[in-house]
Amino acid sequence: MENGSPINIKTMSSAPQGDTNPKGTNIVWHEASVDRQSRAQQRGHRSAILWFTGLSGSGKSTLANAVNAALFEQGLATYVLDGDNIRHSLCKDLGFSDSDREENIRRIGEVAKLFLDAGVIVLTAFVSPFRADRDKARKLVDVDDFIEIHCAADLSICEERDTKGLYAKARAGEIKDFTGISSPYEEPASPELKINTGEQSLDSCVEIVLKTLLNRKVIPAKHQPVS
Ligand SMILES: Nc1ncnc2c1ncn2[C@@H]1O[C@H](COP(=O)(O)OS(=O)(=O)O)[C@@H](OP(=O)(O)O)[C@H]1O
Ligand SMILES: Nc1ncnc2c1ncn2[C@@H]1O[C@H](COP(=O)(O)OP(=O)(O)O)[C@@H](O)[C@H]1O
């Protein structure tokens, strides 16, 4: 780690507090043999959840993947969880009703927490339109571990981009409950980062995220991959 300083993070490999499994019986928590702190020490960087939220077409996937590539280049352990992809697998049973979106984000919050415990910087790119659902994901982890990044592009710009042709279909009534058109998007009240992905260049947006990770000591100033 930078200047040889230790990485101090709250380990999460212990049993969660409270009744988290009301349906379960005869289930015993197993302590992990390797904890998060040890992984961070070995890898030379801490883990974090970078939670990208915004309208379809706002640039979540593009920005998350560009940041991911930059971090990977520096030898850091990273992974992107992307809405479109996860909806082909873990969440393929879910649609776009409010309750399905809530369940989608609940699962992603839990998966992101596992990545955090595994010592990985995980970047999630989901519309995640409801504030309450994002806040639930935030509350699963320690305060320093969750960085909410609002990809703030105006609806008009997203609609103009219409990279997948979905806005045109939503306007034509061919897709119901489409975020921004027929389903709400609740902007984050106080995200760690609000980036104008509608007007700023991709490179400058990547720079903003990387600078924030440096300032928050998620990533070291200079990271040399283990050879
Ligand atoms: N009704 C409706 N509303 C919004 N988006 C829709 C819808 N139907 C399909 N899509 C496509 O699915 C992607 C959004 O999935 P998410 O899992 O991120 O959505 S959510 O967080 O559960 O709201 C979203 O991907 P992105 O464009 O990358 O945001 C769309 O391509
Ligand atoms: N600053 C920026 N950040 C991210 N995407 C941008 C930016 N400027 C332009 N774009 C473009 O906007 C589109 C965003 O699409 P995408 O990343 O799929 O959005 P989302 O995942 O939010 O649906 C892409 O065509 C991308 O090249």
Image: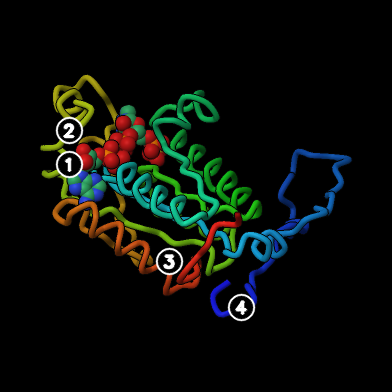
The label nearer to you, 3 versus 4, is 4
Secondary-structure class at tag 3: helix
Q: Is residue 224 above or below residue 82?
A: below
Q: Write down the residue under mark 3.
A: 213
Task: Tell me the quadrant of ligand 1.
Answer: top left
On residue 4, which mark appears? 4
Q: Is residue 101 above or below residue 194?
A: above
Q: Write down the residue under mark 1.
A: 158
Q: Earlier in the sequence, mark 2 or mark 4?
A: 4
Residue at 67% across, 66% down:
41
Residue at 23% across, 52% down:
202
Q: Are marks 1 and 4 in contact (CB under 8 Å)?
A: no
Q: Are marks 1 and 2 in contact (CB under 8 Å)?
A: yes
Q: Quadrant of the C terminus?
A: bottom right
The label nearer to you, 3 versus 2, is 3
Secondary-structure class at tag 2: loop
Q: Are marks 3 and 4 in contact (CB under 8 Å)?
A: no
Label 1, label 4: how far apart the Cα atoms are: 44 Å
The amino acid type of the residue labelled 1 equals Cys
Q: Earlier in the sequence, mark 3 or mark 2?
A: 2
Classify mark 2: residues with Cα within 10 Å, few (<14), some (14-19) or many (20+). some
